[in-house]
Amino acid sequence: MNYTEKNNMNYTENNNNELMGVVYKLIAENTELYYIGSYSGDWGKYRVSKHFYNNNSCVSKKLLEYGKISIIILEKSYFKDRTELRKLEQNYIDMNRLDKNMLNINNAYTDNEYKRIQKKKCDKLYYEKNKDKIKNYHKERHKKLMESGFYDINRTERNIRQNELRREKTINKRISKWIDSINEY
């Protein structure tokens, strides 16, 4: 597959051991479709060349249908780690999110807050799909606890028993560590 390279693609480390990172845009010649990506360090040319293989599993594969592809460097900078580069790539993706010509469907970077919100949505969806299964599980669990007499013990006695078990585990761990330290000598 032929492709043209716009702007120089040099990538090296600077004096602060930071990697050169590049955010790029792939554009097919006879269409307005494009893909935004990034690479860093020495494997940049390898990463970009993967877009041109027939067995490419990335969404950029769609660009191959339109012939000649150009690479445009959107930003080139030094980064301490790939996370910073991914955040920059994500900014470019977010700026173009509403553009129907952008092929990117996955995020380049997600922070912990975003992951937490997504997990909450997934958990809610799972609950909605499996309500009956979850309710039956809790009913069965409650039934087993009732049969075992767990609820017959008042809360204070239960807490005392749990604390005694914790204390016993802690003491056993300390004894094991003490024995191990003696065996070392």
Image (cartoon, rainbow, N blue to C red):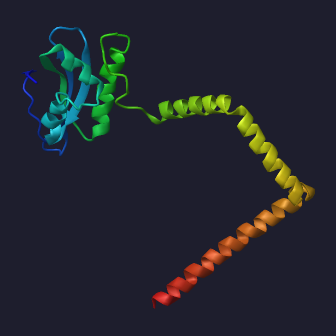
Q: Looking at the image, which is closer to me, 121 or 148?
A: 148
Task: State the residue at coordinates (30%, 11%).
Answer: 101
Q: Seen in the image, is 66 located left or right of residue 119?
A: left
Percent of width and height locating residue 43: 16, 40
Q: Looking at the image, which is closer to me, 33 or 53?
A: 53
Percent of width and height locating residue 114: 48, 30
Task: State the residue at coordinates (84%, 60%).
Answer: 158
Q: Seen in the image, is 99 located left or right of residue 55?
A: right
Percent of width and height locating residue 166: 71, 67
Q: Is residue 115 visible?
A: yes
Task: State the residue at coordinates (82%, 60%).
Answer: 159
User: Which quarter of the rendering shows the N terminus?
Assistant: top left
Percent of width and height locating residue 115: 49, 34
Quarter of the image holding residue 151? bottom right
Look at the picture and state if 152 lies above or below 127. Answer: below
Quarter of the image holding residue 70? top left
User: Which quarter of the rendering shows the C terminus?
Assistant: bottom left
Q: How many marks?
A: 0
Q: Is residue 6 visible?
A: no
